Image (spheres, rainbow, N blue to C red):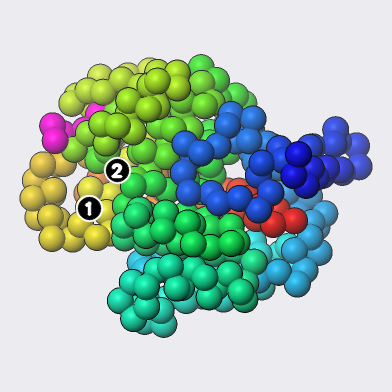
Amino acid sequence: MRNPKVVAEAGKEPLLRPAALARRHLLSLHDLTPSEIEYLLTLAQRVKAAPDHHKHALEGKTLAMLFEKPSLRTRVTFEVGMGQLGGQVLYLGPQEVGLGQREAVKDVARNLSRWVDAVVARVFSHQTVLELAEHASIPVINGLSDFEHPCQALGDYLTLLEHKGRLEGTTLAWVGDGNNVAHSLMYGAARLGVRMRIATPAGYEPDRSALAEARREGGAIELTHDPAQAVAGADAVYTDVWTSMGQEDEAETREQVFRPYQVNARLMLAAGPQALFMHCSPAHRGQEVTDDVMDAPSSLVCDQAENRLHIQKAILLALLS
Ligand code: CP
Ligand code: NVA
């Protein structure tokens, strides 16, 4: 067993870190076991309840943030989170590094491994984050690729857990593009016993092999092209932008194709009064979601954004302390 770590807090059951989490990469929710995900969710709840408890945990550690794309939530929450744990961060935007252009991805990985303790990478191609991980001797965390957004999905399951009191047996409806966020939620759903109903236009379904994998691992995941069918009776209705970063050339076509998939008051009515609304943000108001749904009391978007902070801190503690 590598480096078992007990997080003990006054009045709480000690929380034993699954040994395999220490010093590992976090590239995909597919790589985590159900108990590792449950550990991260529990640790995030504890960190949220007692933020001061871990304020020296990562003293002397440095996190590099290697970003090929813009970000608000991921950047701010990793930076603030690392600071609250006593560590420091270094932001490296596209102008600084030129990943794979100014320098080979493997050379960037090898150099960073000599200076810092972990890397959060936000990349266009999932292959880039895999290549960074292959050549880095420090943990690499996927801060969004074109295929997955695992930190987002972990934060979202924390949010759903807080609002529903449980995850197993809940139903999450996904409406829109079968994209990176959908893939990570699918992998998480399979591990947490969440049922997913996914409504996409034809041709925009989630990746076929990701879907097959999630189903093979027990995921109850239904696909449909009918948003009303997907949302009926769901605990939460989740949508995301129709055009993800890197797909800007397709924006015009996508605006036409996705129009019937807008989450508006009519669709939330079809979902039922129990349905919460979720969006990873940034949201394009008036496209995939209307103002009234974004701003309704049933909207969890700000809680989702806040929980990114708590889950990032749990991830950093699990991988680095
Ligand atoms: N949800 C999310 O990852 O937001 P950013 O793109 O602003 O980081
Ligand atoms: N699917 C979106 C998520 C942004 C957080 C994108 O990749 O742009």
Confirm or reject: label 2 Cβ below 8 Å from ligand 2: yes
The answer to which of 72 and 69 lies nearer the viewer is: 69
Q: Is mark 1 within 8 Å of ligand 2?
A: yes
Q: Which residue is mark 2?
A: 179
Q: Quadrant of residue 103?
A: bottom left
Q: Is residue 201 magenta?
A: yes
Separation of residues labelled 1 and 2 (CA atoms):
9 Å
Residue 104 pos. (x, y %): 37, 73
* Neighbour tally class for label 1: few under 14, some 14-19, many 20 plus, Cα within 10 Å: many
In percent of width and height, residue 141 lies at 52, 55
Q: Earlier in the sequence, mark 1 or mark 2?
A: 2
Q: Residue at x 85, y 36 (%)?
A: 14
What span is in magenta? 199-203
Q: Please say if 126 is above or below 44.
A: below
Is residue 317 visible to the viewer in this orientation of the structure? yes
| Relative height, residue 213 to residue 302 (above, below) | above
Q: Which residue is at 16% across, 41% downward? A: 258
210 versus 136 height, above or below: above
- Badge nearest the viewer, 1 or 2: 2
Residue 43, how many percent across, how many down? 71, 42
Q: Main secondary structure of the magenta part?
A: loop
Residue type indicated by callout 1: Thr
Label 2: which secondary element = loop
Query: 310 or 110: which is nearer to us?
Result: 110
Secondary structure under the numbered disc 1 in the rendered image: loop
Q: Is residue 183 highlighted in magenta?
A: no
Image quadrant where one finds the N terminus: top right
Residue assigned mark 1: 243
Query: Can you say which quadrant of the picture contains the C terminus?
Result: bottom right
Q: Amino acid at mark 2?
A: Asn
